[in-house]
Image (cartoon, helix red, strand yellow):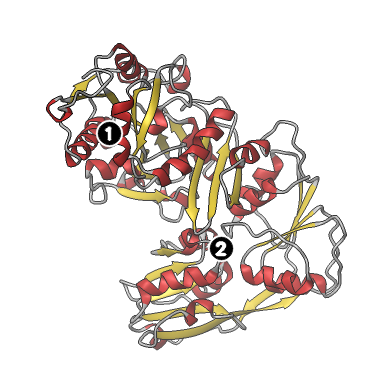
Amino acid sequence: MSDHLPEDNKKSKIVIGTRGSELALWQANFIKDRLAEIGHDSELKIIKTQGDKILNLSFDKLEGKGFFTKELEEELLNGTIDLAVHSHKDLPTTNPEGLIIAAVSEREDPAELLVILKDCVDIQQKLSVKFGGMVGTSSNRRKSQLLAVRPDFEIEELRGNVQTRLQKLRDENYDAIMLAKAGVIRLGYDLSEEFHVEELEPTELIPAPAQGVLAVQIRESDTALFDLLQPLNNQVVAEQIAVERKVLNMFDGGCQLPLGCYCRKDGSLFQVWTAKASDGTDFPDRLFMQSKTTKGLAEKIVSKFAPDRKFPANVFISRELSENSYLRNALKKHQIEIEDRSLIRTFPSINNLDPFILRNIDWVFFSSKNAIEYFFKLDPQLPKKVKFGVLGRGSEDALRLHGKVADFNGEEEGIDTKDIALEFAKLANGSNVLFPSAKGSLKTIQKALSDDTKIVELTVYETVSEDNVAQSFAEVLIFTSPSNVDSYFAENLLEPDQQVICIGKTTGQKFDELGVKYTLPFSPDEMGLAEAVFALDY
């Protein structure tokens, strides 16, 4: 096929260039089938790339960019193929002269999978891998983000296609490996029987720019083919990944750069998560930003990572942090001092649990880490098939310490507890749900459940304010609950230049009443707090 389609173009086969791996062939055949749906025949030509040939070096040891794309692009320019199908995340941010991206596919789930040998699982650990586990990945982006939450991990290089990586795991060369969920779905693999699979949402472990999207590349001069391909082009996805790719371009990075960037549309807002490190062992800086338009959005994001940007000198948080907490490490990287002290005391409301309360319970929902701690101190004897729901990652981590894994995590539903409640209701309506909670709980989740749902309330703890709460003169004040706000402002005032961050809308409502501006992190946990501090202007 030449640079223009002949009049009877349906008789002329379009030549699709592709790598030869099972996943690459799936991707090429996907485009081939889409072309057939709009009446155009095509055939595949398999081409080996540098990334396929050199398997003994990690990406940061390979020269240049486009390890999986260069040879395909050369054949396009030479006219031996008409279009090339790529994993969009593998493409350099600038096309070679004479080539363009004519279409992008819908986006497959961009989450990451941590695939773990079953005898290396420890669900009491975050991410479910045993302490000191060896994890295989060749990505500096994955490595830096994994080590930020599990510094005990030993990260080892892992190259090869999906089948090769899985076989290396079966051979016990690793305790766990990282895979993109999109590839596993496209290959139709069910890994859950053979391995323990932990899914990391794209807001938790931020994926590569354009992860899960296919790119169809053609010659710029081939205008007829460009027009032919437009029914395959997903404009919504194209707009979102344009932000991600521009961020990557402005950092002048390729797939070896420890950069994650993920943009999605939520109602009228574009939401973008970014994580960047200097190398695979560097603690990544994270940022969450949202905007009504993509215009100038990438520039705003990149400006927050400028080497000369200013940070607050000190941060106060109304919660005690462990020495290895995520937030402490994120602030320590930029020499930000942290003052951590709780302004409230908690104590149990009950010391014994009536076992009949737990009979026939289908779900237990926790809205705080304190509720989890006080509930399990009662040594509850739960039904074997009971499921657990939590508001966010912080509560999920607390639940793990008791050997339980959350079946529902409201993290992905956003900041608003009402939205989380509606999503939980879709799963729990018509069942028996237990709510261990604090005295005076707002019961937002309960209010969303249907009338045929049996709700069992269990007050397990109460809070009281500490006496003589000292004022903090830190530049940023982080409040972790409404009761901490009440305790602090019963005796103190806000200084004019102090900025406020709140966990949860109910905490923010306290500042609405005071007429004080505040920042609400997307996720109500230390990772979300680190993103919020990083987004502040100084």
Residue 11 horizontal/vertical position (percent) = 12, 27
Name the image quarter holding the C terminus.
top right
In this picture, residue 142 sits left or right of residue 537: left
Q: Quadrant of residue 169?
A: top left
Instruction: List the residue tagged with mark 2.
Output: 415
Corner quadrant of residue 215:
top left
Is 282 or 110 nearer to us in this picture?
A: 110
Residue 356 appearing in the image: yes
Q: Position of residue 252 (x, y in %)?
A: 56, 25
Could you tell me which residue is drawn at 68 percent across and 72 percent down?
509
Can the viewer see residue 344? Answer: no
Q: Earlier in the sequence, mark 1 or mark 2?
A: 1
In the picture, the disc for residue 228 is: 1
Left or right, residue 323 beside residue 255: right
98 lies above or below 427 = above
Position of 222 with respect to 155 (left or right) is left
Mark 1: few, some, or many residues within 10 Å (few <14, many ≥20)?
some
- Nearer the observer, 195 or 83: 83
Mark 1 secondary-structure assignment: helix
Circle 2: element type: loop
Q: For the residues marked 1 and 2, what is the alpha-carbon distance in whole angstroms?
A: 42 Å
